[in-house]
Image (cartoon, grey):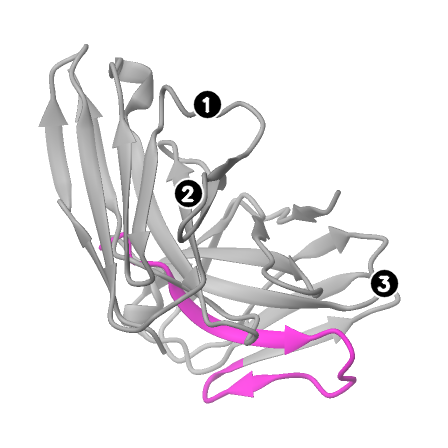
């Protein structure tokens, strides 16, 4: 079974600054995907970024980038130029790659507050 | 990405009653998933729904309490039966683009049982 650990229950950052959210995971799988989802107060789970485990290059999506360390089983999210709209709960998630479908295993989440 | 419509968005229900949550996707998908998010907690998978077959439930969830229908490739319902205050949660529908290993979510249903 996979486990995902987010050790930071809450983080704060000022607008325009950079913040890094931590995530570690445990798995015996070699092929998998890692995700960061954002859940604002509207409750909608929004996919922020995805990383394929077989890719060494870190994924980036505009202001969002990850630091993927496969050997260390670490997957942190960096948000640059933080905006007020980034205030949300952020969940790290793991998906096993295989035939058919795969379900997500989520961490407990990190509440990010961006202040003016 | 798939567009998922989930309704109702919120409801307040009396204990002992049942609520059916609907999930509509704008494209055909093989699998649909139902998650529960208890207050202040992460998401927990309730069950996986494949069209034309019985849903597969995770440990701790049973069909009598959370019956699921999947009549076609774009629609599913989750019923929360005989509700108690402990069922107060956000319930989310999710789909995975077939073979894409990328999951998308509906906007969730906030259920309060009084």
Q: Which residues are magenta?
A: A42-64
Mark on residue A72? 3
Rendered residue at 48%/25% (across/down)? B61
Whether A62 is among the magenta residues is yes
Mark on residue B35? 2
**Residue B54: where, in percent of width, then height?**
45, 39
Mark on residue B14? none
Q: Nearer the viewer, residue B49 or A25?
A: B49
Q: Image quadrant for the C terminus of chain B? A: top left
Disc 2, disc 3: CB below 8 Å? Answer: no
Residue B107 seen in this snapshot: yes
Closer to the observer: label 2 or label 3? 2
Whether B99 is among the magenta residues is no
Q: Which of the 4 image quarters holds residue A89?
A: bottom left
Closer to the observer: label 2 or label 1? 1
Disc 1, disc 3: CB below 8 Å? Answer: no
- Tell which subunit mark 3 falls on: A
The residue singled out by tag 1 in the image is B62
Distance of mark 2 from mark 1, alpha carbons? 13 Å
Up the image or down, A53 lies above or below B43; here it is: below
């Amino acid at each position: 079974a996979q486990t995902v650990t987010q050790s930071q229950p809450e983080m704060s950052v000022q607008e325009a600054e950079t913040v890094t959210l931590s995530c570690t995971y445990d798995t015996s799988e070699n092929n998998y995907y890692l995700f960061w989802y954002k859940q604002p107060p509207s409750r909608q789970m929004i996919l922020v970024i995805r990383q394929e485990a077989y890719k060494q290059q870190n994924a980036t999506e505009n202001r969002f980038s990850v630091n993927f360390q496969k050997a260390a089983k670490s997957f942190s999210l960096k948000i640059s130029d933080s905006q007020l709209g980034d205030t949300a709960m952020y969940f790290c998630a793991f998906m096993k790659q295989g035939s058919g479908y795969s379900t997500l295993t989520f961490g407990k989440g990190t509440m990010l507050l961006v202040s003016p | 990405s798939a567009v998922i419509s989930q309704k109702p968005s919120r409801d307040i229900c009396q204990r002992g009653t049942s609520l059916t949550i609907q999930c509509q996707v704008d494209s055909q998908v093989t699998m649909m998933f139902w998650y529960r998010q208890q207050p202040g907690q992460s998401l927990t998978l309730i069950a996986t729904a494949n069209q034309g077959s019985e849903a597969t439930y995770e440990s701790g969830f049973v069909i009598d309490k959370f019956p699921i229908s999947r009549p076609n490739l774009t629609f599913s319902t989750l019923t929360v039966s005989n509700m108690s205050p402990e069922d107060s949660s956000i319930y989310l529908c999710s789909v995975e683009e077939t073979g894409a290993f990328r999951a998308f979510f509906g906007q969730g249903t906030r259920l309060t049982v009084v």
